């Protein structure tokens, strides 16, 4: 039997890492990796800090991402029965990030208080 130079790779992460190493092209920038990991770990404050450090997003896009992160925090507070804290997030963090009054009314109308 001939010997093969093929290296068996056991996971998609290893394949991605191997491609990055060989091509010298990053598949995912560190800042985006930090953002993704923060969000999936439920570390919304850290995710907001990462968004604040992103350049080139533009003001409106950054505000939209921040809004969605605060919306997630709001929903988690509601689900855990922390209604007053949720209302505080809604008033102080979410509402200022909505661009116009009709949009604000529409967005807040979708949110449920239990």
Image: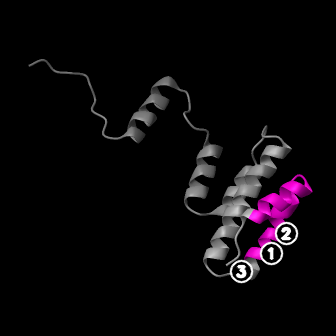
Q: From the viewer's perspective, is 18 left or right of 82?
A: left
Q: Earlier in the sequence, mark 2 or mark 3?
A: 3
Instruction: Say whether residue 14 is magenta.
Output: no
Instruction: Say whether residue 89 is magenta.
Output: yes
Per the image, the residue denoted by label 1 is 88
Residue lying at the far left of the rendered structure: 1
In the picture, the disc for residue 92 is: 2
Q: CA distance from mark 2 to mark 1?
A: 6 Å
Q: Are marks 3 and 1 in contact (CB under 8 Å)?
A: no
Q: Residues within 10 Å of mark 1 (few under 14, many from 20)?
A: few
Q: CA distance from mark 2 to mark 3?
A: 14 Å
Q: Nearer the viewer, residue 16 or 1?
A: 16
Q: Are marks 2 and 1 in contact (CB under 8 Å)?
A: yes
Residue at (79, 64) in percent of width and height: 108
**Scheme of image coloration:** one colour
Magenta segment, principal secondary structure? helix
Residue at (73, 75) in percent of width and height: 86
Q: Quadrant of residue 104?
A: bottom right
> Compared to 13, does 106 lie above or below?
below
Q: Earlier in the sequence, mark 3 or mark 1?
A: 3
Q: Secondary structure at mark 1?
A: helix
Residue at (79, 44) in percent of width and height: 61
In the picture, the quarter occupied by the N terminus is top left
Q: Nearer the viewer, residue 99 or 22?
A: 99
Q: Secondary structure at mark 2?
A: helix
Q: CA distance from mark 3 to mark 1?
A: 9 Å
In the picture, the disc for residue 38 is: none
* Residue 15, horizontal then vertical, whole percent: 39, 34
In the picture, the disc for residue 83 is: 3
Magenta-drawn segment: 86-109
Q: Quadrant of residue 96?
A: bottom right
């Amino acid at each position: 039997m001939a010997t093969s130079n093929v290296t068996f790779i056991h996971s998609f992460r290893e394949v991605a890492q191997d491609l990055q190493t060989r091509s010298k092209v990053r598949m995912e920038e560190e800042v985006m990796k930090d953002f993704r990991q923060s969000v999936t770990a439920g570390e919304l404050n850290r995710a907001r800090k990462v968004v604040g450090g992103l350049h080139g997003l533009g003001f409106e896009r950054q505000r939209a991402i921040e809004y969605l992160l605060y919306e997630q925090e709001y929903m988690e507070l509601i689900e855990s029965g922390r209604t007053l804290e949720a209302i505080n997030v809604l008033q102080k963090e979410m509402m200022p990030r909505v661009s116009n009054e009709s949009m604000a009314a529409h967005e807040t109308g979708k949110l449920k208080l239990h």
